[in-house]
Image: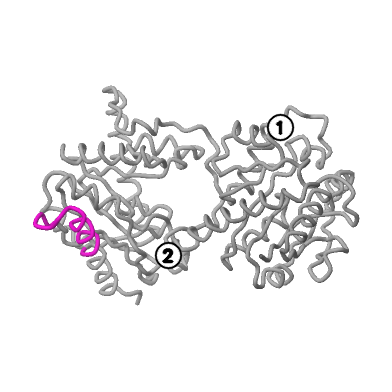
């Protein structure tokens, strides 16, 4: 296995994180693996990078055996050639850039948490201010570690601290004291095997983006386990009022800013009772375009739980009646059953079957089955909505360079009750996808 270690380091790995990394590399080399090190140390050889001097921070970091490395894309790409895995030892700018490049070339990535929060505070000259430890863990999750699906904790205390700080990644513990034992290579190899398997699945799922920063840092404003909990009369009135004025305001804004217009509104008039609308997901606020397309019908939108932890936005989502989709498998089954009951009562929902946002994408990605499974179980139709792009025209060319949008409502697609349930779901998904694909072709960017 070819493993690339990326670490800011001093010239001599005599203590601290550089010494830990050197011991790990020696253990893996003895086990027959090829190790490449991207570092500002002389021992890095062909993959040596320049130091990045940060005045105050560089002075204190050097006391802990660390020199900050300056990211060099050319050297990183050379080191990645033919590599099986990238191991990031620290959460600084070099490792951040190394992670981005590794994701683009689809090499699995694992992150180390080699020291506790106090160790990072000492690197910043704030080792005396231990009260900042909680903030350090939160900040490192926000700035770097949220991008790693697997984290190697170098002590049990570090794992406990990360769990307390709500790290949702898979945490693996190998204590620093074990690196002197050659048997630790087997533990590390087992970890690498899990990382490679997880990240290959991630790369194969082309519907997901993996380069976004996580801004969901606030406490959640909703109870994800009870998405349809009944509200009192004041809350229902407040949510209704908020939905009406917000959708109206955003419809006007979308027309002015994006030239948004709606076609095929006649198909909405043919719908009665519950229904599920679906659309492609190509803009941060395309949910407001969808809601404008569905006026005067009120639609319940769904969202990932993380959006209910965004500053300010979390309260707006709650007031607009947006429902969180839980992450766990058992929770998802409960959510699906509850949504089916709401559909049977006549409520309408909107889902993004592509699974994630891809800004200004002009194609149509594969669909996930969730929305179609619920539509079949509830016996309700799917209303496809295509968000098409068109060139900027008229006065908008003065202040806008990117595309304008329009929403095209397609004819509702109904489940075929003559088919077995599993086949009904596949058939409904396929016909909906084909309808939307054909509509996109009929509305080219021209």
Give the residue at x 82% y 66%.
48
- Please state which of residues 228 and 407 is positioned toward the viewer in this rendering: 228
Give the residue at x 34% y 60%.
280
Q: Quadrant of residue 408?
A: bottom left
* Residue 277 position (above or below residue 166): below
Give the residue at x 40% y 52%.
285
Position of residue 254 measured from the top left corner of the image (x, y, whole percent): 36, 55
Q: Which residue is mark 1?
A: 133
Q: How is the image coloured?
A: one colour
- Is residue 392 on the magenta stretch? no
Check disc 1 and report its element: helix, strand or loop.
helix
User: Magenta segment range?
Assistant: 415-431
* Residue 6 position (above or below residue 63): below
**Outermost residue toward the front?**
183
Q: Quadrant of residue 322?
A: top left
**Outermost residue toward the bottom?**
446
Q: Which residue is mark 2?
A: 360
Position of residue 38 measured from the top left corner of the image (x, y, whole percent): 76, 63
């Amino acid at each position: 296995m070819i493993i690339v270690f990326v670490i800011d380091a001093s010239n001599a790995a005599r203590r601290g994180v550089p010494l830990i990394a050197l011991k790990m590399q020696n253990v893996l080399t003895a086990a027959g693996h090829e190790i490449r090190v991207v570092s500002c140390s002389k021992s890095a050889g062909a993959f040596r990078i320049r130091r990045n001097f940060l005045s105050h921070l560089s002075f204190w970091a050097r006391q802990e055996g660390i020199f900050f490395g300056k990211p060099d894309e050319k050297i990183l790409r050379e080191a990645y050639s033919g590599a099986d895995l990238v191991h990031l030892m620290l959460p600084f700018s070099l490792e951040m850039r190394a992670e981005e490049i590794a994701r683009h070339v689809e090499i699995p990535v694992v992150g180390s948490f080699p020291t506790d929060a106090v160790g990072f505070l000492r690197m910043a000259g704030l080792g005396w201010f231990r009260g900042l430890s909680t903030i350090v863990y939160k900040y490192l999750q926000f700035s770097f570690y949220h991008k790693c699906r697997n984290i190697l904790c170098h002590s049990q205390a570090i794992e406990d601290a990360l769990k307390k700080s709500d790290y949702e990644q898979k945490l693996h513990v190998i204590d620093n004291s074990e690196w002197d034992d050659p048997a630790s290579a087997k533990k590390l190899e087992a970890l690498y095997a899990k990382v490679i398997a997880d990240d290959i699945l991630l790369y194969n799922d082309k519907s997901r983006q993996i380069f976004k920063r996580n801004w969901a840092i606030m406490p959640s404003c909703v109870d994800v386990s009870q998405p349809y909990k009944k509200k009192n009369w004041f809350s229902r009135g407040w949510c209704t009022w908020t939905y009406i004025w917000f959708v109206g305001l955003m419809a006007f804004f979308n027309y002015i800013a994006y030239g948004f217009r709606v076609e095929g509104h006649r198909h909405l008039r043919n719908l009665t009772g519950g229904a599920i609308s679906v659309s492609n997901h190509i803009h941060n606020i395309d949910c407001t375009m969808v809601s404008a397309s569905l006026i005067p019908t009120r639609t319940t939108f769904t969202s990932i739980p993380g959006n209910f932890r965004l500053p300010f936005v979390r309260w707006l989502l709650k007031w607009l009646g947006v429902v969180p989709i839980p992450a766990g498998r058992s929770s998802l089954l409960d959510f699906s059953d509850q949504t089916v009951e709401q559909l049977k009562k006549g409520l309408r929902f909107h889902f993004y079957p592509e699974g994630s946002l891809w800004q200004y994408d002009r194609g149509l990605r594969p669909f996930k089955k969730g929305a179609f499974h619920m539509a079949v179980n509830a016996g309700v139709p799917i209303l496809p909505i295509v968000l098409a792009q068109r060139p900027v025209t008229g006065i908008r060319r003065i202040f806008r360079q990117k595309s304008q949008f329009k929403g095209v409502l397609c004819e509702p697609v109904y489940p075929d009750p003559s088919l077995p349930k599993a086949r009904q779901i596949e058939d409904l998904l396929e016909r909906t996808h084909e309808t939307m694909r054909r509509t996109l072709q009929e509305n080219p960017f021209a």
